[in-house]
Image (cartoon, coloured by chain):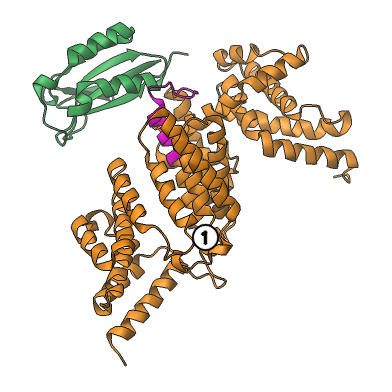
Chain colours: A green, B orange
Amino acid sequence: MQYLLLIISDPAAPTYVPEEDNIEEWVADLEARGAAVVGNRLRPPSDATTVTVRDGKTILTDGPFTESKEWIAGFDVIEVDNLDDALEIAAAHPMARFGRVEVRPAWPFD
Amino acid sequence: MPNPTPATTKASAALAEVVAAERLRIVATLIRTTGDWDLAEDCFHDALTRALATWPVKGIPDNPAAWLTTAAKNRAIDLLRKAQAEQRATERAAHEPPPEQGKEDEEDDVIATFDDDRLRLIFTCCHPALAMENRIALTLRTVLGLSVAETAHVFLVSEQTMQKRLVRTRAKIRDAGIPYRVPPPHLLPERLAGVLAVLYLLFTEGYSSGGDSPDLIRPALADEAIRLTRLVAQLMPHQPEVLALLALELFQHSRAATRLDAAGDLVLLEDQVRSRWNALAIAEASRTLAAAERTLQQQASPPGPYLLQAQIAAEHATAPSAAATDFARIVALYEHLSRVAPSPIVDLNRAIAVSCSEGPDAGLALLDTLQLDAHLGEYHLLHATRADFLRRLGRPTDALPHYCRALELAPSDPERRFLQRRVDGVSRNGWPR
């Protein structure tokens, strides 16, 4: 199954410590498991543009779709057997400690 | 409807018996083979209907449980093929041997996988990705076989709300890819703790609702929780915490008949008639606790929270009288418990044990040190405990406001009546007429 890991920054979480960020180790483990599909860090919400089409008109909004203190800082799409594997991978992500990670199953192709 | 013939009556009785004993095994196996919780349940009920139609005519099969499993599986295959839905599940179900050929083999096969299936079902229902109340609801419905209406009653919600909640929960299991399995060893300790938490919550939910309550479903939950804990203990005999939880539940349940008097009023532990405690339950609890302690020793592992709680319960349950209780050991066990599984409730109970062992002034001093109000400010027993320490210290005027606060917060009628009597008592002492 495919899962999207939304890497979320949380201002209430413990302060980010660059030396404890083992993201390279995490990516290496993901690749060793054969679970890596695609993933990246994202630029801050201030660089976001939200696109809405209504009555044929395209409306562009400067900023993210929702204003919030927590924002999406990155994403990873992984391919694993089941939710337990996805949760284990999410829990090992450094941002699970410095923020939080939402695990969402992808809607499968029929 | 025609009058029931003897054959019909006999078939119904046989069916009721097999459902009581085997429902969980059969449903658990159906969920594994079909991969569809709703379908499994529908097909199980369809099999029951077929049994009622067939058994009076053809006779009761030698192995009624295997008959029901096969009938339900066949129904599932039919439905899956007809709807052309979930092709993968069809393939999985179709790999099961057809019911008529190799019947004996199939029965062996079914029996060999049963135990695992029941555990798979329990672990899946208690998966930590499900909200606690959804885990409990699904366990009540699917593992214990309560009806939707009964499950709704436990949560005090409408049947419709409960039905929706169950559908959503089963959908999450399917769509989020929660595996139908007993977790692998590296996940087992944490997941087992989750299962035990559900079982203990079910037990306390039933236990705290009171044995004399006119409500018939909630008190029965305590029995159901014990039954299920016993099953998990049989299936996982080398897990000390499972045995310990069973012992803890049995020790507590042994007092069910004495907690309220004939008028429905609360009877404190020290005032209960110990000869009316259930000696059989205490004996089973003691044996089970001893087995848990032996297993722990063999594995050379430290005691878990249920073992320590069961040891505390054992001290209370086996003491010849309240006065002869070994409170010093109980204090030591609570201190250990507060290190293994710290919680404000454990601290509160530790303070109570200290007051019994060293006197109410020591209990009060510990209560002041612990500063539990931040966590338990809305918990009636925190205020009742402080009030009780002050009353025992001969300070009724100081006790009164705390009894009043406890009375405001108390959740049940017997507890309110008890606290009202305390309020009246300290009021008289504080302001003599």
Answer whether residue B216 is visible to the viewer in this image. yes
Disc 1 element:
loop
Q: Is B43 located above or below residue A28 in the figure?
A: below
Pick whichever, A86 or B110, lies toward us.
Answer: B110
Q: Is residue B188 magenta?
A: yes
Please tell me which residue is depicted at 42% across the width and 66% down the height of the picture: B323
The residue tagged 1 is B210
Residue B120 x, y percent position in the rendering: 52, 26
Answer whether residue B155 is visible to the viewer in this image. no
Pick whichever, B237 or B20, lies toward us.
Answer: B237
Q: Which residues are magenta?
A: B179-197
Pick whichever, B93 or B374, lies toward us.
Answer: B374
Split into 4 quadrants, where in the image is the N terminus of chain B?
top right
Q: Is residue A8 magenta?
A: no
Asked whether, in this view, residue B207 is left or right of residue B386, the answer is right
Residue B53 x, y percent position in the rendering: 81, 33
Question: Amino acid under label 1?
Answer: Gly
